[in-house]
Image (spheres, coloured by chain):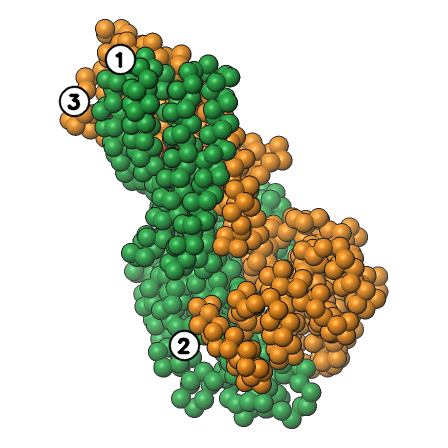
Chain colours: A green, B orange
Amino acid sequence: MAEEIMKIVPDIEEMLTNRKFHELRSMLSEYEPEDIALIFDEVDEESIPILFRILPKEMAAECFVEMDSDHQKTLIEAFSDKELTAVISDLFVDDTVDIIEEMPANVVKRILLHADPQKRKEINELLHYPDDSTGSIMTTEYVELKADMTGEEVFRNIKNTGVDKETIYTCYVTDSARHLIGVITVKDILIAPDEGMTVGDLMEDQVISVGTLDDKEETARTMSKYDLMAMPVVDNENRLVGIVTYDDAMDVIESGDTEDIEIMAAITPTDKPYLKTGVFATWLKRIPWLLLLMVSATFTSKILQHFEDALTHQAAMTALIAFIPMLMDTGGNAGGQVSVTVIRGLSLGEISMRDILKIWWKEIRVAVLCGVTLSAVNFGKMMLIDHVTLYQAAVVSLTIVAVVIIAKLVGATLPIVAKRIGFDPAVMASPFITTIVDALSLLVYFNLAKLVLGAVS
Amino acid sequence: MAEEIMKIVPDIEEMLTNRKFHELRSMLSEYEPEDIALIFDEVDEESIPILFRILPKEMAAECFVEMDSDHQKTLIEAFSDKELTAVISDLFVDDTVDIIEEMPANVVKRILLHADPQKRKEINELLHYPDDSTGSIMTTEYVELKADMTGEEVFRNIKNTGVDKETIYTCYVTDSARHLIGVITVKDILIAPDEGMTVGDLMEDQVISVGTLDDKEETARTMSKYDLMAMPVVDNENRLVGIVTYDDAMDVIESGDTEDIEIMAAITPTDKPYLKTGVFATWLKRIPWLLLLMVSATFTSKILQHFEDALTHQAAMTALIAFIPMLMDTGGNAGGQVSVTVIRGLSLGEISMRDILKIWWKEIRVAVLCGVTLSAVNFGKMMLIDHVTLYQAAVVSLTIVAVVIIAKLVGATLPIVAKRIGFDPAVMASPFITTIVDALSLLVYFNLAKLVLGAVS
């Protein structure tokens, strides 16, 4: 789809130049708003307001939501007051909040000025929730029912107000004090055995709900676990204040995973797609971590300097220099495997702090198996291909076993400790594990070498 | 929730022992099927059929779907023919197929024997789709409408058949030859301005659809992009053959991300959660990659051996050994950052093959910025803290610039090349990039050292 829409960009530009607006509108109406939003990246900035005004009315707001925030800003600045009011009234509250969060203060002011008072109040409330809270992704536009309503009343209610609701299929039942007391779906009503049954008769009163301040990613994962189309959000007193819909949950899961992946690769996460991030911004996301990790490697330098005399003056030790990169990479890889597994398990809620003994016990056994396998293969390789002495091969092979066990334990422990003390466990992925394991590996390697090779020489 | 359910396990075991079945049933009915499925992990194997039979009937099938496949097998073997027929008739076709895929041949036979002929036919069809295809995650239970139906007829249709459909909210309109000609939602009908309007009047005739053999992860990402609750799946002739629902799409996205993360950390991916995977199975998922990467490090050993004489006999060169780990880690980290970014961009469809020049041009500039920053900090550190000579500091710092540029270009290119030749780009993450960049870095380092330090000594 995205590829297809790129192909029509020249046609669109030509129609804009030749003012073939009618033709352009009918062509655009065949695409989805998500695809049309991409076209705004391609045309000149002065064409943006023209192109937007050409869009079929029912598509304009949806397309606006999907656009790059720079283009949204350009458009808001170009809008007449009337246009702005119209667009805002077509937007869902949660989308308006997402847009507002990217705008400079004067644009925010103008948007709030043109929202109707009820919407303005809701926008202001949603703007106050922290970035990672469920409140920040919820919407206040849901269908709220009372237990004594009949199916017919529900459908009348939906017919009158449904066009402005994010979902009409899952409806929430509240008592007079707005406490959440049940959930009912349109399907429940449509397939009800008896038309006279009320919402109270048909509703499910065991409702899964979350709080406004609960972590948004946990809320999204819970929705995925229970296959929920929408999740009700309540305040401290179980009063319904909003809902999260499955489409927003999907976005949270996807961007949460992107964030985890970026942190695991030692990159400061961002919402912007790679190709839209500038060179300087990309540098800024990467350089602090590279610097930190580079400076941390001072430990390995110090260890190597400490053993320099032995390494350069004892012939048996000298040959060991060649295997430093292999040992370090193996440690990094072995530690990375387990740290990433634990980090993902924590993210998905499959692992928690109380599993740490189970994890250790398992990883020790896996580490011994991995270490012995690698060590055996390495021993054979060193004797047959590298033609080193038996003692040298033994030192390197024994070190491998130790390195793998150290790496697995460090890799299994640090993410859980990080989570425990309130850090993002994803930080404790390969780059940091590698830096720590490197230093430990070198200490084991050279001490073992001194012990074995010192004894035989 | 999961934590909460674990707390009631002792109570459940006690009720089972004391045969307080009625009490147990009413307690269980307050939980979600997804949570109850977890209890089956905790009780003795002989209690599993008893516990299952206690479950409220409407919950049994849903709970069965969520269970570990070992428990499903235990139950199927314990079921009477009548019980098996009842459970299968309550399952959706796509869930039945997921279960069958994990069962041994004799159990599969028994399941197929107890499915009704229509369902058996659909199961057999779905079983034939490749694992990563959209066909493998679709279901054949959807609402299919004709264009001349009225709203009332649609609702009557849903009332009669809706209970067996995975979703009733998005319905598909087909012509007499079952070609997909439109899509309509229950909301469209409920908020229709005029009750006399037909499906044909209200439906959207620009339908986004996918093919049965399209990649399932791409289908799921498309659904997320367009916020679709369900996606129609068509055959080569645009005949409707199934739908994918948002809950299955969410699962595909989550497990696709887990798979990518595992491959990026050099682990063979698996569907089983970490804590349920045995030690031997875990070893098997990790060891081939560790072996491959360890053996690949032979190149770095050879390079180091080649320069051994110079390294151990020329005093100015000897000091350089201490900085090998730092240079290698920096290269690995810098390469890992870009490779992971590119892999994720490919996964999300934000980057494609045709962007490679844009990516190179951007990464060269980012690499120069990163390289120069790191190099400057390192130069200062080496002069002030490590007390090396000006020339030694210069060699290491110049090498850093080269290493970062090499790492960024290798890291940006290999994932795209891998995708191009049909491999999973996620393989080209930090571990492989590190191994390649290590060897290149050492070559640059020692050749530069010979050039500079050889000239001055």
Mark 2, chain letter? A
Nearer to us: label 2 or label 3: 3
Would you name the residue on which mark 2 appears?
A234
- Let me know if residue A59 appears in the view: no
Left or right, B362 with reference to A163: left
Which amino acid type is shown beneath numbered disc 2?
Val
Distance in Å between CA atoms under marks 2 and 3:
62 Å
Q: Is residue A354 visible?
A: yes
Specify the subunit that label 3 lies on: B
The count of marks equals 3
Label 3 to label 1: alpha-carbon separation: 22 Å
Q: Position of residue B445 (x, y in %)?
A: 34, 18
Q: Secondary structure at mark 1?
A: helix
The residue nearer to you, when weighing B191 against B82, is B82
Residue B110, position as x, y percentages in the image: 78, 63
Alpha carbon of mark 1 to alpha carbon of mark 2: how far? 72 Å
Secondary structure state at the residue bearing disc 3: loop
Circle 3 is placed at which residue position?
A: B387
B105 vs B229, nearest the viewer: B105
For the point 70% across and 63% down, the residue is B96
Q: Position of residue A366 (x, y in %)?
A: 47, 43
Q: Residue at horizontal 42%, vertical 34%?
A: A401
Q: Which residue is mark 1?
A: A313
Can marks 3 and 1 be said to lie on one chain? no
- Neighbor class of circle 2 (other Cα within 10 Å; few <14, some 14-19, many 20+) is many
| Residue ID at (62%, 69%) | B46
Question: Mark 1 or mark 2, which has the lower sequence index?
Answer: 2
The image quarter in which residue A238 lies:
bottom left
Identity of the amino acid at label 3?
Answer: His
Foreground disc of the pair 1, 2: 1
